[in-house]
Image (cartoon, rainbow, N blue to C red):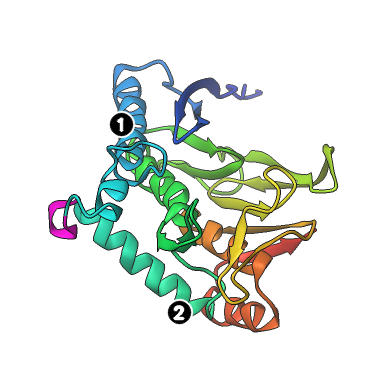
Amino acid sequence: MSTMTVAPERKAWVEQVMGMPISIHLRGQGVEGEATARAVADAFATLREMDSIFSTYKEDSQLLRLRREEVAIEDCSPLVREALAIGEEAERVTRGAFTTLLPTATGDLAFDPTGLVKGWAVDLAARRLTGLPGLSYCINAGGDLLVGAHADLPRTGPGSISWRVGIEDPRDRTRIASTLELTEGAVATSGTAARGAHLYDPRTREMVSRSGSVTVTGPELVWADIWATALFVGDADTRDAFSRYAPDYLSTEL
């Protein structure tokens, strides 16, 4: 007697948030349910809320109003204080290779947690999806992504749902340099291939223009993204800090 394996259902949603397309993909049984639709809507609402707080493009964002001294930090969302704390911790553990003090258009340094907000926003949005029985999810935000699943789904073996993730060759963007298979975890890549010299090295006070990329995988997207940036702009001291402070994360340099 043979047992038929039922292929997982699939569904995807895409919205423009934070100046980029962010997609939510679900696989499993029950992707069309009402509870699923509510959870996805809540996840996108979380992403839009983070954008309304931390956008460096929207003039009415809390971040820009704070920088213009129109409001005090006490008037802002508690997430602003949390962003400050995450940034301070990131600067400490990366030994200065990551910072939330970035150059403005006029060349001054100002609080700008852009380097951590996207990954953090995805981590928070994913909490809306983890309670969906029988479903695995992948949130893709500009090529950085987070994979997870309900606790009732196995992470290995029969019944597990894996996602195949391609890592782009930074010197030939038409080519996939390597692939990963994940049932849960985050993948973040930093480099200059897509956006040029946009990563700031706080120790030299210059943008990094070298070619290549660093991809970091681990449990949380916020820290995968922080470490990918730090390792790309950093040096041997940063790599030593990564080995010491991020034992659950792995890096690949291309």
One can see residue 204 in this view: yes
Q: What residue do we see at 49% from left, 55% from top?
A: 115
Is 23 rendered above or below residue 185?
Answer: above
The answer to whether residue 220 is seen in the rendering is: no
Given the image, on which type of amino acid does mark 2 rest? Arg
Label at residue 157: none
Q: Quadrant of residue 88?
A: bottom left
Density class for disc 1 (Cα within 10 Å; few <14, some 14-19, many ≥20) is: some
Q: Check residue 92 in the rendering and tell me which mark sits there, or answer none.
A: 2
Q: Residue at x 27, y 37 (%)?
A: 60
* Left or right placement of residue 7 versus residue 93 in this view: right
Residue reaching furthest to the left: 75
Residue 174 located left or right of residue 140: right
Most foreground residue, 244 or 231: 231
Using the numbered discs, state the Cα–Cα distance from disc 2 to disc 1 in whole angstroms.
32 Å
Q: Is residue 75 magenta?
A: yes
Tell me the magenta residue range: 72-76
Picture layout, residue 175 above or below residue 203: above
Look at the image and tell me in which quarter the C terminus lies: bottom right
In the rendered image of this protein, does residue 243 appear above or below residue 253?
A: below
Element carrying mark 1: helix
**In which quadrant of the rendered view does residue 194 lie?**
top right
**In-front residue for pair 85/108:** 108
From the image, tell me which residue sits under label 1: 45
Residue 174 among those drawn in magenta: no
Label 2 or label 1, whichever lies nearer to me, is 2
Mark 2 touches mark 1? (CB < 8 Å): no
